[in-house]
Amino acid sequence: MFNQTPRFRDTTAPTNIIWENRHIKGISFFSRMSSAMLIIIFMLSLAFVVIFTFKQAQITNQKKWPSIDCDLLNTQYTPVQINDFADNEFFRIAESKGKAPMMGALKCKCIGDIKAGNRATGYYDTYNRKYSVTDPSGASVEE
Amino acid sequence: MNNGIKYVIIILNYVIRTAVILIITMVGCDTESDQLIYITNMVFICTFFNTGILPMLCTANLEGQLPPFITNALSLKGDSSDFNQNWFVNIGDTIVGSMMFNIYYPAVMEAGWFGLRTLKRLLDKRGASAEHPSKSQSIQSYVNIWCGPKFFIHYKYSSILNIVFITMVFGPGMPTLFQFACAQLVVLYTMENYMLYYVYKAPPSYDVKLNNHVLRVLAWAPFVMLIFAYWTFSNPQLLGSYESLLPLTTKSGSFYNQHYWFTSLRLV
């Protein structure tokens, strides 16, 4: 055709065309797409803040109340050992006014006490009564 | 709170997905296939970023891996200096949790939508007689109540891409992700087949453009897996092959194990 070989390429199917958007081309399309990207980046930044906040709270909680398998602990240590661990843990937490992370032994001891029906007295109450009035060496001065 | 983060991620993914679809639709692409490709890409990038990258960045400690001005500027001085014990406990657990939740999430969502549709139809039939079987005032409102939802192919493709890429990136370190990914894909396939035949409106005839595009993107997944698998499997803590250990500066300090990307690649 006019001394040139015609080349044909597939056109877009009519049902594939969004007719009301045909006029959006070049700089107009580019600016719309850039604005969309900025909005999406802003949304992702917000998502980052939300996830970061939740994640930090989760990590703090996990450090404070670690998950522990008490059944496993009971098979690996004797009740006397677990009581000693729980004592140490309790005093460490008491000294730090609740800021020291829990290690798990105290939790298992409390669960054991509750299962054994000692809920009324409770580990905290028992130890609070026993050690609340002590001299610097740790001996009770109440008796 | 300890398990809440995975639900937060799923909810954020849903919100962002809806917003992205709306925004890209408003951009004004001149063909349906271009619009679908843009939406699929953007939804995939956002959900992958939210599910895989963001939780990792939250506690990342990249001191020694990147120049100090970058770690200082982006505050990348968290607890996890590598794919170590701390990372698996804090971040790996969240990623696995999200992937597990995603197995039954599509079914739960559909149950919710089904309930809503049924309620609308019951309200439409309430007080109706044989002569006037519907309370709808026009044929269009009757059709809107009694027909199913519109079929959107773009975010189904994005979900598949997200599942595959998350599994490929973190799967070498957490092989359980492969079985969760398999379960998710089976649930998705079953749900979509059922929905397509019995629930959705008849979808338009899509061309192969979007399908081919998704297949091209999926082809990159094994390459990404190789990179992350190399990093994970060259971790001295995982292999137990320490040559030297750095003592912690403080009790709560980050654990460093001499695992740097430039030494892994034998660049230094």
Image: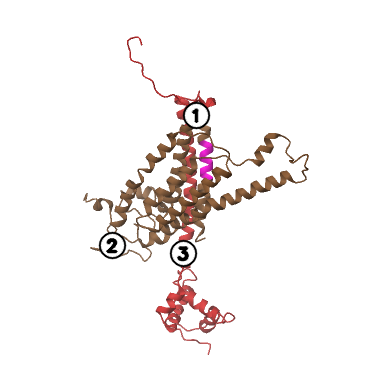
Seen from the viewer's position, the closer of residues A108 and B122 is B122
Seen from the viewer's position, the closer of residues B262 and A131 is B262
Work out how far the residue at label 3 is from the one at label 2, CA to CA, in angstroms. Answer: 26 Å
Chain for mark 1? A
Helix, strand or loop status at disc 2:
helix
Image vertical order of residue B151 relative to residue B98, above or below: above
Q: Which chain is brown?
A: B
Are the residues flagged by discs 3 and 2 in contact, CB closer than 8 Å?
no
Residue A24 visible? The answer is yes
Furthest toward the bottom, the residue is A143
Which residue corresponds to mark 1? A16
Chain for mark 2? B
Over which residues does the magenta segment extend?
B15-23
Mark 1 Cα shell of 10 Å, populated few (<14), some (14-19), many (≥20) = some
Quarter of the image with the N terminus of chain A is top left
Q: Position of residue A39 (x, y in %)?
A: 49, 38
Work out how far the residue at label 3 is from the one at label 1, CA to CA, in angstroms. Answer: 53 Å
Residue B76 visible? The answer is no
Which amino acid lies under the numbered mark 3 shown in the image of this protein? Answer: Gln
Which residue corresponds to mark 2? B239
Of marks 1 and 2, the one in the foreground: 1
Seen from the viewer's position, the closer of residues B78 and B128 is B128
Task: Indicate yes or no whether the magenta region holds residue B149.
Answer: no
Q: What residue sits 47% from the left and 84% below the top?
A: A135
Q: Which chain is red?
A: A
Looking at the picture, the colour scheme in use is by chain
Q: What residue sits 55% from the left and 78% below the top?
A: A114
Mark 2 Cα shell of 10 Å, populated few (<14), some (14-19), many (≥20) = few
Work out how far the residue at label 1 is from the one at label 2, CA to CA, in angstroms. Answer: 54 Å
Co-location on one chain, circles 3 and 2: no
